[in-house]
Image (spheres, rainbow, N blue to C red):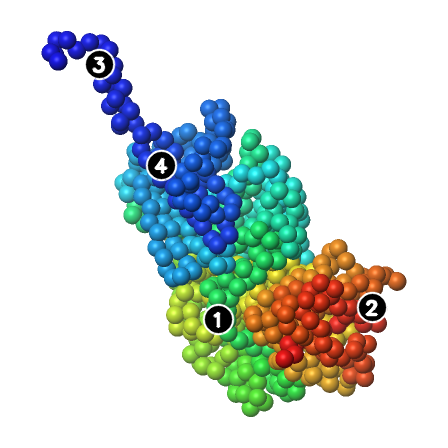
Amino acid sequence: MNRKHITRFDYLLILYFFTFLLSPSFAQKVTIPIATADHMFLLQTDNQNRLRTVYFGKPIENESEWESVSSLSKYDENNSGIYNNAYTPAGTWNLSDPAIQVKHADGNTSLELKYVSHKQEQLDGNVTLINILLKDPVYPFEVNLYYKVWKNENLVEQWVAIKHNESNPVLLQKYASANLFFSNKDFYLTSFQGEYLKEMQPIENKLEQGIKTIDSKLGTRAMLMQTPNFMISFGHPASETEGTVLLGQLAWSGSFKLDFEIDSNKNLRLITGINPFASEYSLAPNKTFTTPSLIYALSNNGVGEASRNLQDWARKYRVLDGQGERLTLLNNWEATYFDFNENKIVGLFKGAKDIGVDLFLLDDGWFGNKYPRNNDDAGLGDWQENKKKLPHGIGYLVKEAKKEGVKFGIWIEPEMVNPKSELYEKHLDWVIRQPQRPEIYYRNQMVLDLTNPEVQDFVFGIVDDLFVKNPELAFIKWDCNAVIFNAYSEYLHKQGIPQSNLYVDYVKGLYSVLERLRAKYPKVPMMLCSGGGGRADYEFLKYFTEFWPSDDTEPLERIFLQWNYSYFFPSITTDNHVTDWGKQPLKFRVDVASMGKLGFDIVTDHLSPKDRIFCKQAISNYQTFKNIVWHGNQYRLVDPYKNDIASIMYVTKDKSRAVVFNYLVNNRFNITATKRPVVFNGLDKNKKYSIKEINLYPDIPSTLEQNKVYSGDFLMKAGYNPDVNLKRTSVILEINEVK
Ligand code: GLA
């Protein structure tokens, strides 16, 4: 064709051809599966190369059909925006709540994230790590989305790494860990509210259009007031055995935010992460900011299965020594409070040995000289033995305990300081406080500034010093009884780092201390404690073997509390102590505390002769079934919120042994509890089992026919009546396979 003869039409044709060829809509869609055994998310690029969540449901087997999924949804996005972005940026096309919002080094506040590449690594037969790189086409700013998938446990851990190469720091104004999207008709959220002595109280709500926020702004801990644990039921509220459910937790030990948004199309957007409140994070060039993880277990068969998967995962992959042993103990806190001396403590060792526990735990009050720790308003921060109370030091106590045949453990609260302390006098600049304002205290104490490496060394040194001087020290109770008020760090100020880094760098500073401690002392069991409100999450539990769920040890309350914690945590991590709280008899208290890691906080000398016999017998029984409770499958059989009794069962993995705990939770006359059988779960229907009541109080025989044999089939269909009533308020059944 002669050039001269190219017509206008030809030009249009050529233009159209090149536009089409170069347009992103011509680009092949990329579909990335995030798949467990029974669930699948599909992420897919759109014609703008943005990544979207296009499917959540049962795994679609045929890979060639994955691409078609996105065309099934006909939402008009012109006016209402895109809701299903896999990590929604702010400042460009987005109209909804973002997952990430930044201010670039030049002050510009726009961000676009486009898919660049992804890789998938098979870590073993069960575990896959998927990594997706997104980049801003204009600024040198990138985000890496990580998905770690445990196929068999139907569990996903999701986090994000953010990096840039701009000329100066970028301000991260929001930086979520996860941005999930679910398309379904109805969603029910169970959140868990926390309060001192009332931790983990569940509240279930149907989610309606708008944003429901669960958050905390406490700085040092997550769980007082609200907790980062939640449950989503899809379609209708899930039960223990039915329904599709997600059990989730943001594994971050400071301020968090969970946003559940029902969008205008009635889909659920879930954005979770560190609370951006007062926490705009200044990120230096070429440094990586890694968010905490969102961890979630999924099930199509109810909450019970999701919990068992989460518990299995935690023991196998997450909790320090999750598949190991734990030490039973006697604690002196409620027995003595601050009022003790060397002789009194040594005198208690005998009692520990006598009832048969493994360890004696010396609680608060052992330190401080200029300001002795004789109550909670002085001494915190001065970690030297009080010479009056303990003239021969901790070493002497460790030795004396050993002579008596028990191990020795100790309480510390190393992140904190009382204004009445030598530490405060010497290192005011180490304390989080606003220098020009009156100080605000929580339990008469303040928080040390763990953003400061010197403070990190100090905290590391407290524990290190204890171990160096007392290599046989066998247990640490690490407490945390304050929150951050008057947030201000002298250290950050001196470094020229914005104060809004404080909340995040506090927690990261604490993790780095724990990292160092575990490098040097990998195995020593440590309890995570935070009397009011709890302190337990799966980032902390990388370093701790167990946690203290609440100061509330009233056994009736405790049944509910332990029930709620068990949705998220295996019983091996839950420290339950028998105390004098409540009106229930000793048997009831010991039985309840046995559903986890058993401990005592009583004066053993005050036990009546029969109580003493019972205690010893119960502890020796515990030794025989503790492994079923710690490592077995847990079934929440009868819900105390809806019934007159509570019933919880643990079964060994091979289904050969089980233990069932049953309690009366309603003391009204003529209740129906005793009239109905409890239907068991988790046994082998083809096996035969004997049932025997254990932990009987001296001279009170069981009303049950002992050692009668039943089939698993019968017990899981017709059930068994443990005969719980006003005279038998607590009944433990031991179930053994009969061959
Ligand atoms: C917190 C803990 C208690 C005890 C005291 C000591 O309240 O929860 O178990 O250790 O501190 O001060």
How would you rate the neighbour count of disc 3 (Cα within 10 Å): few for under 14, some for 14-19, many for 20 or more?
few
How would you rate the neighbour count of disc 4 (Cα within 10 Å): few for under 14, some for 14-19, many for 20 or more?
some
Seen at 46% across and 45% down, the residue is: 60
Circle 4 or circle 1, nearest the eye = 4
Asked whether residue 238 is in view, the answer is yes
Which label sits on residue 11? 3
Q: Which residue is mark 2?
A: 725
The kind of secondary structure element at disc 3 is: helix
Instruction: Using the image, determine if residue 660 lies above or below residue 295.
Output: below
Q: Which amino acid, mark 4?
A: Lys
Distance from Cα at disc 3 to Cα at disc 2: 91 Å
Q: Which residue is mark 1?
A: 321
List x then y, in percent, for residue 652. 59, 71
Decide which of tag 3 and tag 2 comes sooner along the chain: 3
Q: Which amino acid, mark 2?
A: Asn
Q: Which amino acid, mark 3?
A: Tyr
List x then y, in percent, for residue 712. 67, 69
Distance from Cα at disc 4 to Cα at disc 1: 44 Å
Q: Please tell me which residue lies in front, 4 or 625.
A: 4
Quarter of the rendering containing residue 234: top right
Q: Is residue 52 left or right of residue 369?
A: left
Q: Which amino acid, mark 1?
A: Asp
List x then y, in percent, for residue 661. 70, 69
Q: Which residue is mark 4?
A: 29
Q: Is residue 728 left or right of residue 365?
A: right
Q: Quadrant of the C terminus?
A: bottom right
The kind of secondary structure element at disc 2 is: loop
Seen at 54% across and 59% down, the residue is: 310
Query: Is the CB of the residue bearing disc 2 within 8 angstroms of ligand 1?
Result: no
List x then y, in percent, for residue 359. 58, 80
